Amino acid sequence: MPTPDPRPLAGVVVVDLTRVLAGPYCTLVLANLGARVVKVERPDGGDDARHIGPFVNGTSLYFAALNHSKESIALDLKREADRVVFDRLLEAADVLVENFRPGTMERLGYGWDAVHTRFPRLVYAAASGFGHTGPLAPRPAFDLVVQAMGGIMSMTGHPGGPPARVGVSIGDMVAGLYLAIGIQAALARRRDTGTAAKVDVAMFDCQLALLENALTTHLVTGHVPGPLGTRHPNIAPFQAFAGSDGKRFVVCAGHDNLFRDFSAAIGRPDLPDDPRFLTADARRTNAEALTAELDAVLGTRPAAAWLEVLERARVPCAPINTVAEAVRHPQAAARHMVVEVADPRIGTLFVAGNPVKLSGVSEASTRRPPPALDGDRSAILDWLNAR
Amino acid sequence: MPTPDPRPLAGVVVVDLTRVLAGPYCTLVLANLGARVVKVERPDGGDDARHIGPFVNGTSLYFAALNHSKESIALDLKREADRVVFDRLLEAADVLVENFRPGTMERLGYGWDAVHTRFPRLVYAAASGFGHTGPLAPRPAFDLVVQAMGGIMSMTGHPGGPPARVGVSIGDMVAGLYLAIGIQAALARRRDTGTAAKVDVAMFDCQLALLENALTTHLVTGHVPGPLGTRHPNIAPFQAFAGSDGKRFVVCAGHDNLFRDFSAAIGRPDLPDDPRFLTADARRTNAEALTAELDAVLGTRPAAAWLEVLERARVPCAPINTVAEAVRHPQAAARHMVVEVADPRIGTLFVAGNPVKLSGVSEASTRRPPPALDGDRSAILDWLNAR
């Protein structure tokens, strides 16, 4: 008898209509936890991410990074024969995920009300730019739109300089994570009550939920935060410094004890007794003066020398790694965070591992390669026929 | 008879030993979904976040933003009498969450093995800088350390300039979201199998899981991404432009159809037929030339005028909002993303709403204020005694 799959979402079937990023990132999280994810793609080209470069042997690496561990069937939801197959998939599924603009699913006849009536056990999960309610609901959005509108870009970049985009698509990915949380919550409620729910996650809402204390501080005190380069708005020292070789490294020593250890380690044991830097709150309000003092000291030796000194003193610090350095760090290997996949088209493919480590679930050493468009049709139809 | 609480995690009890950000952000997500979160704090000062400014009437806004909707009891886990109370809490709880450095809980006698033996139904969830395994496991980390080590800072900022920190603490918050996902997964598996699990989430791992295609593209092609200002690495045009008034706005028009609409709207209908910009992939590889063409056009009128033109043409675009503008957007109000709380110490407090919208769960119009240190002791003890 085969051992049961210990992964927590084993047995959960997800029908995935999503494209590009927020939705596919969500369903990747679910797949990593053991869910069976069936991508339902447009016959003419499929998921738009298949057409985002760079390509290897005609296959998008962008698509591959997000869609390994999933299956694909191509269906045209405007064709009757394909709608029959889609209905059978919904009948078999626990979750339907989509990230169309609000209203699209209703026009196709698969809005929440229609789907819930026909498939009362099916959780319906939607990610969109602005959500399914409110004045901006119909509006299209992409990652950069919500990064810009939600305030995070205004806080990212260097003082006096232009705002910067966060270098990865957190507008999409954080919405994908909140959607995964909402789907799990809806599945839990379904277990308790027998009733499914609609989950409606907006990328814009998620940006506001990431503002942490900036939202609260602004609305209570009126303070409008701007870009601080590498500094933290509330804690100091908590920023990057340049060594004498121009290489940059970061130091986090805001707590009293850490600040004392840090100051001693760099040969300035007097700093914690300076009235400007006596308490965490004093350091926060005098962060510029503190930066000037520290720049003067830390500019005298190369970055690597300081990192050695600080690590020995157990002061949290780090080099600013390139992606090449980050993914090759021994810690990434030890945590199975880079996974090799033998892909029939790309050859050797590498994807990110699963950051949710659970006792009793061993790390899979590889992944199912990203599916060809419609590549799993016959297996999916066989499975539906066998149910 | 009272109506049962429709929130999906109603009835779930979380014992929360976490401090500052990654852990408290996770338990805030759980509280927003209906879990009862009991913060167990050090008697001498409690959660470090209570001491991070700014303060109003001596109360930290940083703490308030993250800890509303939770209860507090102060316990010294080195005192026998307090350990007895803590044990009773664990007996009553579904989940224990901690974000100490690995090894700390073992030294207190509450490591996973000990806890799992005594409380086999208790899910044990840990967030840490580098996780509980691997060579860096014992190392302290803060948000900035993992933003630096994980590669995201190297991709954030303007070309040729120094790297920038993402303006909010995504190193912490994304780990908090993955931990919430892991906790829900462990609760689902417990329902299925009766057995609890340990969830081990590392901030560093989560940074790697956010690299999206940068990880895959680097390891397959060798390309090392650098900062691109406001540009997207794979899609163009997808960036900020400055109007004639110097104000900046963003445009996302990478898809063929959108690029055609955009080009027509700005009076350059010739651009989509230019061989350099004919396909999405051509625009990606010639992004700099495209930027030069677009800067010349878009610099001729004020930002607001362009936004009006582009909105009419249904091209995704947005102003770069300050936090003040973002939180006052009518969409934020329509989605209940800013919630007013009457706080006995601060007065009127505002916190972020819940981005997980579920059908059948109405939006709470306010929240329980952040707890005073040990402020819920008697209610918690009464509840334990009544069980």
Image (tube, coloured by chain):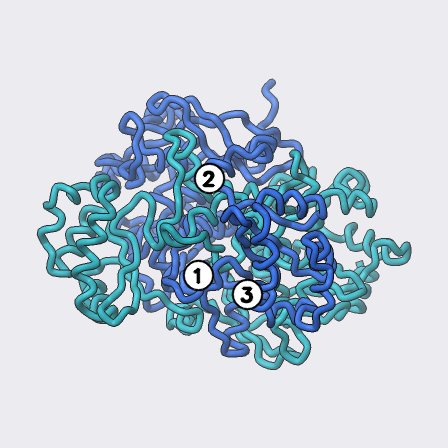
Chain colours: A blue, B cyan
* Chain letter, disc 1 residue: A
* Chain letter, disc 3 residue: A
Eyeballing the image, is B225 above or below B79?
Answer: above
Could you tell me how far apart the alpha carbons at marks 1 and 2 are, in whole angstroms?
A: 21 Å
Asked whether the viewer can see residue B51, the reply is no
Q: In this view, does B46 lie to the left or right of B199?
A: right
Amino acid under disc 2: Val
> Do discs 1 and 2 share a chain?
yes
Residue B56 is situated, as x and y percent measured from the top left of the image, at 63, 78
Residue A231 is situated, as x and y percent measured from the top left of the image, at 53, 60
Residue at left offset 48%, top offset 69%? A225
The residue carrying mark 2 is: A323
Helix, strand or loop status at disc 2: helix
Few, some or many residues within 10 Å of mark 2 (<14, 14–19, 20+): many
Q: Is residue A55 left or right of residue A292?
A: left
The residue carrying mark 3 is: A233
Residue at left offset 59%, top offset 54%? A298
Amino acid under disc 1: His
The residue carrying mark 1 is: A158
Mark with earlier residue (1, 2) = 1
Q: Quick one: A214 or A26, which is closer to the camera?
A: A214
